[in-house]
Amino acid sequence: MDAALFIMQVLNGLQLGLLLFLVASGLTLVFGIMDFVNLAHASLYMVGAMICASVTFVVDSFLWAIVIALPLTALVGWAVERFVARKLYARDHLDQVLATSGLILVLAPKRRKSFKKSSKSVAMVKSSRCEIV
C-alpha cells in the first residue's frame, strides 16, 4: 500500500469519526440537558450541509458560503424548535420520538429532490493546499 493512500484513508476515517462524534454528542447533550429526544439531529446537520453546498454553487466560494449558510441554518433550526419541538417539551418521550422521526421522513425527500442521486463536487479552498510528505 502506498503511503499517500494510507494517509488519505486515515484522514477519511478521522473525518467520519468526528462526524459521528458530532451527531452522537449533539443527541446526548440535547437528551441529557433538555430531557428531549431529538432523533432528527442528524437530519438538521444534513440540512446545514445542503444549504452550505447550495450556497457554494451560487457564490462560488466555500468560505462565503459558510458565512451565509450559518444564519440560514440557524433560521431552519429556530423554525423546527418553534413549530415542532416546543410543543413536545411537556409530552412523553414516545411522542418526541414519533415527532422527530416524522421530521426525518419530511427532510429526507427534500434532500433527494434538491440533489437527486448524483454527487456534486465542490472546489477546494485555494489557500488550503498543502503537500503531504
Image (spheres, rainbow, N blue to C red):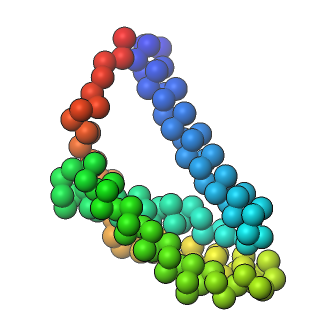
* Front one among 28 and 12: 28
On screen, residue 83 above or below 24: below
Residue occupying image coordinates x 42% and y 67%: 73
Question: Residue 22 placed where, x, y %?
Answer: 59, 50
Residue occupying image coordinates x 55% and y 87%: 83
Question: Residue 11 placed where, x, y %?
Answer: 48, 29
Count up the numbered dots: 0
Question: Residue 17 placed where, x, y %?
Answer: 59, 39
In the image, 57: left or right of 131?
left
* Whether residue 38 is visible: yes
In the image, 51: left or right of 99?
left
* Front one among 53 and 112: 53
Residue occupying image coordinates x 57% and y 73%: 104
On screen, residue 79 above or below 6: below
* Front one among 50 and 120: 50
Question: Residue 42 placed where, x, y %?
Answer: 57, 61
In the image, 124: left or right of 2?
left
On screen, residue 122 above or below 99: above
Quarter of the rendering containing residue 34: bottom right
